[in-house]
Amino acid sequence: MGWKEAAAPVLTRMPAVQRPEGHVPFRRKMYWTAGVLILYFFLTNVTLWGLAGGDDFFGQFRSLLAGGQGTVLQLGIGPIVTASIVLQLLGGANLLGLDTNDPRDQAIYQGLQKFLVLVMIVLTGLPMVFLGNFLQPSSALASSLGVGLFGVRVLLFAQIAAGGLLLLFMDEVISKWGVGSGIGLFIVAGVSQRLVGGLFYWEGGVGNQGLIPTWFDIAIGNVTNIPPLLSGDGVSYLLMQAGILGLITTVFIYVVVVYAESVRVEIPLSHARVKGARGRFPVKLIYASVLPMILVRALQANIQFLGQILNNTINMPAWLGVYANGQPVSGFFYYLAPIYNRQAWMWWTAGTSAEPWQVLIRVAVDLTFMIIGGAIFAIFWVETADMGPEATAKQIQNSGMQIPGFRKNLGVIEKVMERYIPQVTVIGGALVGLLAVMANMLGTIGDVTGTGLLLTISITYKLYEEIAEEQMMEMHPMMRDMFGGGD
């Protein structure tokens, strides 16, 4: 008996959000999406009962992995993304033996994904609660309940586990009843909050407040220590302290992502039976989308989590990692830590105590990790999302279309697709990885991570395209039948 036969009775009975039986009107989809988004913001403000304080386990990855420190959504989308990484690797190595075109195998795959999310909630939540100072229990509550600190820790774990499960089903509601994907929506929500704060936050003074308050203070003369603007120090002040470089980087990344989304190779198609019916199959430069970057950054995040746990539980040797204020400053885990901001690599400033050669090694490792990792996970993403040459060729043939000038044969269509899709997938994945590191190194508005900014722009762009497509189908119901969206 194979693993599928043994696990099928359990995996196919995992709780799931029921699929709509027919077409869901666009307005209702928007209501579901807005409702889940409101619930998400509400839950990120529900503080954990019994929490006395603690450090953010996710640190600089918080905007990417969503959720909120010290709230019910403490875990964010971390368990969902980590489970997706495991499935991507297993699927890419063809170890699962599942045919996603088979409804039964599809149900097993979805059940396996939920089971892995449960496992990751436990594996992430337990160290967060029981190791280190990430979630410190309230001694006052322990005394009043008479359960001890261990009992309060159990309560904390139960709350964040419930939040992780809620987020899983909220994502499923969006995928089946709403517009876009829940994970994408939560990332956009978290990053947008920080972007708005980076523009309008009005406390903390220059260097800590938002871009608009900073320039307002400069304009009315509230800032007195500005060096002469035409000097080198003045230009540096405007770029760094006044936030001009962050604004330029944010606009640059926005323009590049929107442009890259529009760059495509269009393969001409014609209908085999309907004369004059023609179309095009677009192969975008960012063919696999920016979403594989979540997997790359989540892998880096998990490596850093391991370092934090080891630092809190054992006396690590210096070559493995030396930590200060919860962050590695030298050793193996330092070199594997992503570049978060300008201070992390500008050794000529007071932002880092590392030697120049150490900083250069760290930058090189981050670039290599993101570029190669982006290309690899983009390939996995394309294959598991049925966007590869073989799956695309089947979709074209099943739609009754063919490539003009070529025989109507599945193998021929697949060979044509193999000329474009694998190469574009690798180039697009590597380009996104390079852009993410560049954005981190130069800084952005609100100090959102480069990956978070890339994801927000790309997801918002695709959400706009999907909303436009939904509205077109509402106006022209026949279009829904052509795209396979009928009842």
Image: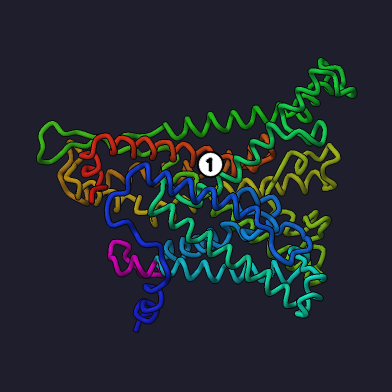
When asked about the image quadrant of residue 202, the answer is top right
User: Is residue 464 shown to the viewer in this render?
Assistant: yes
322, 100: nearer the viewer? 100
Image location (x, y in percent) of residue 163: 58, 62
| Residue range corresponding to the magenta coloring | 95-109
128, 292: nearer the viewer? 128
When asked about the image quadrant of residue 454, the answer is top right
Q: Is residue 100 magenta?
A: yes
210, 82: nearer the viewer? 210
User: For the N terminus, which image quadrant?
Assistant: bottom left
Q: Amino acid at mark 1?
A: Val
Residue 214 in the figure: left or right of residue 186: right
> What residue lies at 48% left-to-right and 63% top-to-bottom?
89
> What residue lies at 66% left-to-right and 50% top-to-bottom?
365
- Residue 426 higher or lower than 386, as above or below: above
- Residue 245 higher or lower than 315, as above or below: above
Residue furthest top as drawn:
230
When asked about the image quadrant of residue 235, the answer is top right
> What residue lies at 82% left-to-right and 71% top-to-bottom?
139
> What residue lies at 37% left-to-right and 42% top-to-bottom?
27
What secondary structure is marked by label 1? helix
Residue located beneath label 1 in the image: 432
Residue furthest right as drawn:
225
Image location (x, y in percent) of residue 302: 63, 61
User: Is residue 375 shown to the viewer in this render?
Assistant: no
Q: Is residue 275 magenta?
A: no
Image location (x, y in percent) of residue 352: 82, 45
